[in-house]
Image (cartoon, coloured by chain):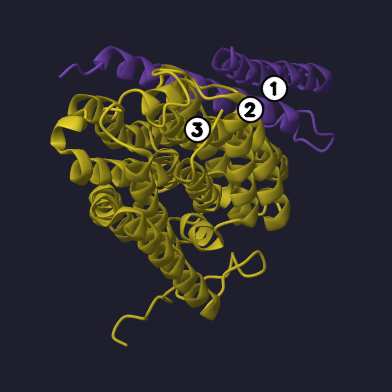
């Protein structure tokens, strides 16, 4: 196969996105395990990273949804995909900086759609597929996962109410290690496929692969490794938000939440729904919080997250669209400018994250927690 | 626009059944393991009627069943 420079650039950018996807989403699988102390933070991210790589090899259903469904591959070029990826990466980095578990998948779809819209017009976007395979599952999946986790948590507490406390806690702690591993595996299956889909789409638009092909093996391998490495680096900011700020999670809740997430993600990946692992896992954690005691859930945090979720797709679309404007009007020069600006903004976000670093050592401390104020004070 | 409500509903129901079954089985296993502890209360109200050996065996059966559900799920996806 003979790749032009732009195809190589797009593949590298896609893998960079995959990396941000990994560290953005470590929290989904491991936040509750780290919060309950079932796993030490560094061990948790190592297990999660390895299982993400394994998961990447399990299935290609979601990759096919992306490479042959959302946008009209005959009307876009690799440069447009590049612009979309830049939008997705920048949005992922911004939300990571403020510690919001927004959907990497929606950032990706938003970026691609915005770039396609600007470069090829609305006709090149398959709105039907967008609604039925992305938007609708995005609205339904966190609710479904939340309800499942609520039922499971309620039953877990109900059944073990009279059992020995120590045995129950230790048992659910071991259970959590297994269930968190399942979520990591499911995450690798679901999310690594999204980047595979994008790279495959690029190869198709560049003419290196026939239309409607599945991802080649080297694409599967590099995507699995990129997302695994990103997961290992760990998005500690988001882990803190999900593990500590949503609700005070105990081991039975963590186990119920992770089991529900794994079940929903694996089932829907099998059906080819490109749903957001972030939405599912966040929904489960809220459900598990509500399943123990309704008042213990910080619903204000839920409001912030819901807002970020609604904004993610359009925001990434705007950045992707702006990048597409530059690359389609500015040609090679425009592409270089977008690349330089993208790298610059990413570096800036990284530098500002160093000012108040959150890492494996302080992930479970919550400095911002407001102490209850006595009445009349 | 063609929305595949059937598949969405199927995903919801299958996930509900699988997740609740796994969590309930593990919870039951832990109840059994508690009852099998040497210092578990016996004879009082709410105490286990089964012997420790039976309780332990039943617990392992529950855990195996939960593991089987998980393994079958992975098998279905990877197939």
In the drawing, does residue A158 fall left or right of residue A304?
right
Which secondary structure, mark 3?
A: helix
Which secondary structure, mark 1?
A: helix
User: How many marks can you see?
Assistant: 3
Q: Residue at x 15, y 38 (%)?
A: A121
Q: Which chain is yellow?
A: A
Chain letter, disc 3 residue: A
Q: Which chain is purple?
A: B
Between label 2 and label 3, give the one nearer the viewer.
Answer: 3
Mark 1 neighbour density, 10 Å: few (under 14) some (14–19) many (20 or more) = many
Labels 3 & 1 near each other (Cβ < 8 A): no
Q: Where does label 1 land, which residue?
A: B63
Q: Where does label 3 land, which residue?
A: A196
Residue A171 image offset from top left, x and y in percent: 70, 37
Which secondary structure, mark 2?
A: helix
Q: Where does label 2 land, which residue?
A: B26
Between label 3 and label 1, give the one nearer the viewer.
Answer: 3
Give the alpha-carbon distance from disc 2 to disc 1, as whole Å.
6 Å
In the drawing, does residue B29 fall left or right of residue A105?
right
**Residue A172 sits in quarter:** top right
Mark 2 neighbour density, 10 Å: few (under 14) some (14–19) many (20 or more) = many
Residue B32 image offset from top left, x and y in percent: 71, 26
Residue B33 image offset from top left, x and y in percent: 74, 29
Q: Residue at x 55, y 58 (%)?
A: A235
Chain letter, disc 2 residue: B
Labels 2 & 1 near each other (Cβ < 8 A): yes
Mark 3 neighbour density, 10 Å: few (under 14) some (14–19) many (20 or more) = many
**Quarter of the picture holding the C terminus of chain A:** bottom left
Chain letter, disc 1 residue: B
């Amino acid at each position: 196969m003979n790749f032009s420079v732009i195809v190589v650039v797009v593949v590298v950018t896609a893998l960079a996105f995959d990396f941000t996807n990994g560290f953005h989403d470590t929290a989904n699988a491991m936040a509750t395990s780290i919060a309950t102390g079932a796993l030490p933070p560094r061990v948790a991210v190592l297990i999660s990273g390895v299982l993400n790589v394994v998961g990447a090899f399990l299935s290609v259903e979601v990759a096919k949804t992306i490479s042959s469904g959302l946008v009209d591959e005959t009307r876009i070029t690799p440069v447009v995909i590049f612009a979309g990826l830049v939008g997705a990466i920048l949005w992922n980095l911004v939300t990571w900086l403020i510690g919001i578990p927004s959907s990497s998948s929606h950032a990706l779809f938003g970026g691609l759609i915005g770039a396609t819209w600007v470069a090829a017009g609305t006709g090149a976007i398959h709105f039907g597929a967008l609604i039925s395979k992305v938007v609708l599952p995005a609205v339904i999946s966190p609710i479904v996962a939340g309800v499942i986790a609520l039922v499971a948590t309620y039953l877990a507490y109900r059944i073990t109410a009279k059992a020995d406390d120590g045995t129950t806690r230790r048992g659910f702690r071991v259970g959590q290690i297994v269930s968190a591993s399942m979520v990591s595996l499911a995450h690798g299956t679901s999310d690594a496929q999204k980047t595979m889909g994008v790279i495959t789409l690029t190869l198709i638009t560049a003419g290196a692969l026939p239309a409607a092909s599945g991802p080649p093996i080297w694409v599967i391998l590099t995507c699995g490794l990129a997302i695994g490495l990103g997961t290992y680096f760990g998005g500690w900011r988001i882990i803190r938000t999900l593990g500590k700020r949503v609700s005070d999670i105990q081991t039975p809740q963590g186990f119920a939440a992770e089991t529900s997430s794994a079940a929903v993600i694996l089932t829907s990946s099998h059906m080819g729904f490109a749903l957001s692992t972030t939405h599912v896992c966040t929904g489960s954690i809220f459900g598990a919080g509500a399943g123990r005691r309704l008042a213990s859930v910080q619903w204000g945090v839920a409001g912030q997250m819901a807002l970020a979720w609604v904004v993610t797709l359009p925001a990434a679309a705007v950045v992707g669209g702006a990048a597409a404007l530059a690359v389609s009007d500015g040609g090679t020069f425009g592409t270089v400018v977008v690349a330089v600006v993208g790298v610059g903004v990413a570096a800036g976000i990284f530098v500002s994250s160093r000012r108040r670093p959150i890492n494996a050592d302080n992930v479970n401390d919550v400095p911002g927690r407001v102490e209850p104020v006595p009445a009349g004070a | 626009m063609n929305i595949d409500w059937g598949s969405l509903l199927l995903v919801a129901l299958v996930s509900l059944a699988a997740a609740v079954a796994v969590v309930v089985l593990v919870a039951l296993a832990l109840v059994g393991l508690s009852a099998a502890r040497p210092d578990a209360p016996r004879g009082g109200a709410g105490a286990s009627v089964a012997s420790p050996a039976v309780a332990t065996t039943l617990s392992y059966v529950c855990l195996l069943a939960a593991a089987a559900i998980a393994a079958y799920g992975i098998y279905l996806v990877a197939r």
